[in-house]
Amino acid sequence: MPTNEQVLDALRGVAYPGFSKDIVSLGAVESVEAAPDQVTVRLKRVSADEATLAELVENAYKALTPIAGGAEVDILVGGAPVDTGHGHGHHHGHGHDHGHEHSHGANPFKRGTLPGVKRVVPVTSGKGGVGKSTVAVNLAAGLTRLGNKVGILDLDIFGPSVHKMLGAAGERLSIAGGKIIPVERHGLKVVSIGMAADDAEALIMRGPMVMKVLDQLINQVGWGELDYLVVDLPPGTGDVPLSLVQSLAINGAVVVTTPQDVALIDVRRAVTMFQQTETHILGIVENMSYYQCEKCGDVAHIFGHDGGAREAERQGLPLLAQIPLTKTICEEMDRGQPVFDETVSPQIAKVFENLARRVIEEVDRAPEPCGPEAFAHQGGG
């Protein structure tokens, strides 16, 4: 009978389909339990693609069979078995037939592209409360003001706010031709799960339902022609951001933090997730960098001084912007107005204009994202 550690060691030899990293390092293994007659492995449902999950489970079976002895091997994804093409449920340690290989031709896991969308730029943070959505909305508005066709997709499933910040809180998503139709606000095309439920209606979902909604929001929206799609991700390194970078070819991510040490610790986790999934990072935005009195101009570093700048240097990443904490930003977001408006606050408008320009520059110099063609040849190694 193998031990739990031996099971984990075997799973460390299983690469996530399409990546060189193993499923243990990527956090796809939820738990393992080795008993005399049965080895049970629970994997997180970190992809909405059933073919990817089937390949993942099949590869895990192959890794565990040599150490299982006569024990049954059960591999569950999100609490349920996955059909690998060899039947549902479990496999016996010596009874797993390797005579015919699991095959879909080319690797079924491919980072895809969205029709008409030229560039995808997710905005993320290691923790909540750092103003990530505010940065995402004003970055999207800034890109629009610089002459680009821009959409913004709110994937913060349990805490959507983009629709409120853009004055679309009363709007509802519609379907036409099997596609979700974005709402237009301030020159932006907007899609948010918040436009599918009332503000007071709780979004109560578990793994499989979350992944189904995520698949719809990523793959079933009619964006039309876009130069940039800005994606507001939920904070942290959970299923949603991981599934996005596995599903789409990303041009580069923007990581938002505040200068506080506690925020910077979480930033490192977010940066590590992108590095492990071979996703390019455009740079770091230090939000709430300082407080500037809008009457006298005095500056106070409420959350510390230059923490984001030091972390960007530590990570070898560009510092894209240092955004002040001002009353104007808070008030305009609550009113559903992006602050990228020089008539309201010319200084703040300039900050976000410079951020948008920096993002454009960094995207232009970034490596080409790995799309379907690259992954068809890369395989699982």
Image (cartoon, rainbow, N blue to C red):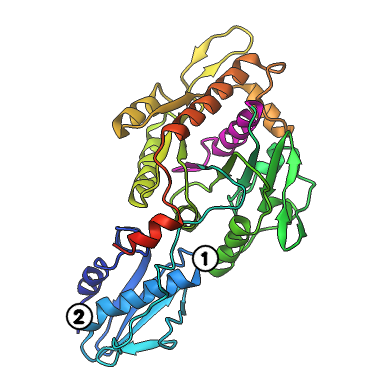
Question: Looking at the image, which is closer to me, 245 or 149?
Answer: 149
Q: Residues within 10 Å of mark 2 (few under 14, many from 20)?
A: some
- In the displayed structure, 332 sits above or below 380; it is above
Q: Is residue 200 visible?
A: no
- Mark 1 or 2: in front is 1
Q: Residue furthest top?
A: 296
Element type where label 1 sits in the image: loop
Seen in the picture, residue 67 relative to 253 is either above or below; the reply is below
Q: How many marks?
A: 2
User: In terms of image quadrants, where is residue 56?
Assistant: bottom left
Q: Marks 1/2: CA distance?
A: 31 Å
On the rendered structure, is 177 left or right of 148? right
Point out residue 14 in the picture as x, y percentages from the top left corner.
Answer: 28, 68
Q: Is residue 94 magenta?
A: no
Residue bearing mark 2: 2
Of the pair 264 and 13, the residue shown nearer to us: 13
Q: Which residues are magenta?
A: 123-146
Residue 298 on image: x %, y %: 54, 9
Disc 2 marks a residue whose amino acid type is Pro
Residue for badge 1: 48
41 to the left or right of 63:
right
The amino acid beneath tag 1 is Ala
